Amino acid sequence: MTQTEITKAPTQGQTDLAFALSLIGGIVMSVGSVLSMFLVFAGRPFFWGMMGGGYGYMMGGYFGNGYYTANLFGMMMGYELVGLTAGILVLIFAVLAKSRPDDRKILGILILSFSLVGLIGMGGFFVGSILGLVGGVLFLVSS
């Protein structure tokens, strides 16, 4: 491999792939956070499982006595709001990186960082954050 092959400009395919992965990652992060918010409002978070978390609905224990609504509701909504905000920002930065080729490096770093932040709200069941991370790295490599 010669020096000119290594330093040549990125192909359109690289930036298109980075854009697509970042865009899909942001969408999955946003939709996953909205879905999780809905489940929190419904009083049945997905992580309790089919039997209500063992000590939940079946036993009438700690989770079944209003623990979730009284103590964890605000915390879980906060996590999901962080995930939703991170997903929206990844979407915005992906569109900006596609339309502003000169700023791809800084926008790739922002996509990477907000994909990591999105993991707090589970990042679209982790798939969205992973797609955002890969898209951010591809934007960095193509800049």
Image (cartoon, grey):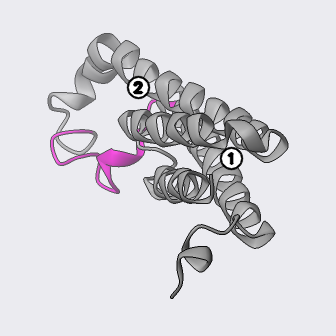
Say which quarter of the image contains residue 122: top left
Does the stretch in magenta take in 93? no
Say which quarter of the image contains residue 62: top left
Inspect the image, locate mark 1, and give the three-letter code of the amino acid beneath it: Ile
In the picture as drawn, the residue positioned furthest to the right comes out as 99
Q: State whether residue 6 is above or below residue 143.
A: below
Q: CA distance from mark 2 to mark 1?
A: 17 Å
Helix, strand or loop at label 2? It is: helix
Marker count (numbered): 2
Residue under the image location 61 percent in, 53 percent down: 139
The residue segment tinted magenta is 42-56
Residue under the image location 36 percent in, 34 percent down: 120
Q: State whether residue 3 is above or below residue 57.
A: below
5 sits left or right of 130 in the view: right
Q: Nearer the viewer, mark 2 or mark 1?
A: 1
The residue tagged 2 is 79
- Estimate how packed mark 1 is, as few (under 14), some (14 to 19) or many (20 or more) residues with alpha carbons within 10 Å: many
Q: Earlier in the sequence, mark 2 or mark 1?
A: 1
Helix, strand or loop at label 1? It is: helix
The residue tagged 1 is 27
Q: State whether residue 107 is above or below residue 135.
A: above
**Main SS class of the magenta portion in the image:** loop
Q: State whether residue 4 is above or below residue 83.
A: below
Q: Position of residue 40 (x, y in %)?
A: 47, 30
